[in-house]
Image (spheres, rainbow, N blue to C red):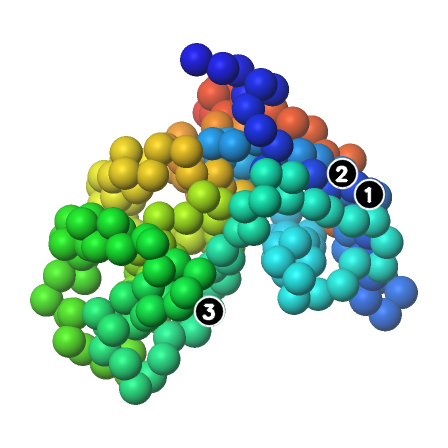
Amino acid sequence: MPTKAQMPTVLQVYGISKSFDGEAVITDLSFSMHEGERLLLFAPSGAGKTTLLRILTGLLDADSGSYTYPSGHEPLILFQEPRLFPYLTVDENIRLPLKSPRFANRANGLAYLSSWYDLSGLHGYENEYPHTLSGGMKRKVSLLRALITLPEFLILDEPFQSLDKQSREVFVQSIFANIPNLSVLFTSHDILDVEIIATTILLIKSPKLQNPIIIEAAEFVSSFTN
């Protein structure tokens, strides 16, 4: 099995900086990701994590620096806000991406949908509309909508906070069993997400994103729990 360093690079970040009203939130940040890596951005609240994700998906411009996707796999992004279409049912919202020419060849994802409905706790809500759902259920719908395309690369902001511990473990196992080469850049404050999802931690101790420390997930968990 190839090592991480031997896998294709899916994201390369070069010296990104960003300020708002003269206040720096990201300073000269550089790092890279490889195919199949699950990189957790672990930093204090308010340190600019969501700002970085918005930059990496083209929703916000950096003041300086740049980023590339060398493998050509531009990521799908899932923010904390579900952003569902109110006039579509749960099932229609989830299946909607498959109508796009970009994902026309991804219908294989439908084979896993029934299982993901069960594991996420959404079974029985397929024909409901978003306004009838709780906030946590809406987040699950948006997550399934991303997964149905069997993506190569996902960027996720606190993706599994609406799932309890047992459901999260089983659901995550199913995701990576069915999409084994999935690369994930995500944020979380939950040590459980480190244990069951992350392979690598981008650890930042500063109140802004700078001077990252790269650490393997197993080592991070050991230091966190001892």
Locate the N terminus and report the quarter of the image it occupies.
top left
Residue 60 appears anywhere in the view: yes
User: Distance from label 1 to label 2 (Cα)?
Assistant: 5 Å
Q: Residue 178 at x, y = what percent?
A: 27, 38
- Looking at the rendered structure, the kind of residue marked 3 is Glu
- Residue assigned mark 1: 15
Residue drawn 78% across the image and 49% down it: 66
Pointer 3: residues within 10 angstroms few (<14), some, or many (20+)? few
- Looking at the rendered structure, the kind of residue marked 1 is Gly
Q: Which residue is most to the left?
A: 124
SS at mark 1 in the image: strand
Q: Are marks 1 and 3 in contact (CB under 8 Å)?
A: no
Quarter occupied by residue 123: bottom left
Label number found at residue 30: 2
Of residues 89 and 198, the one nearer the viewer is 89
Up/down of 119 relative to 99, above or below = above
User: Distance from label 3 to label 2 (Cα)?
Assistant: 27 Å
Pointer 2: residues within 10 angstroms few (<14), some, or many (20+)? some
Q: Is residue 91 left or right of residue 17?
A: left
Residue 41 appears anywhere in the view: no
Residue drawn 21% across the image and 55% down it: 110
- Residue assigned mark 3: 81
Q: Are marks 1 and 2 in contact (CB under 8 Å)?
A: yes
Q: Is residue 206 left or right of residue 44?
A: right
Q: Residue 211 at x, y = what percent?
A: 78, 35
Q: Residue 3 at x, y = what percent?
A: 53, 15
How many marks do you count on the picture? 3
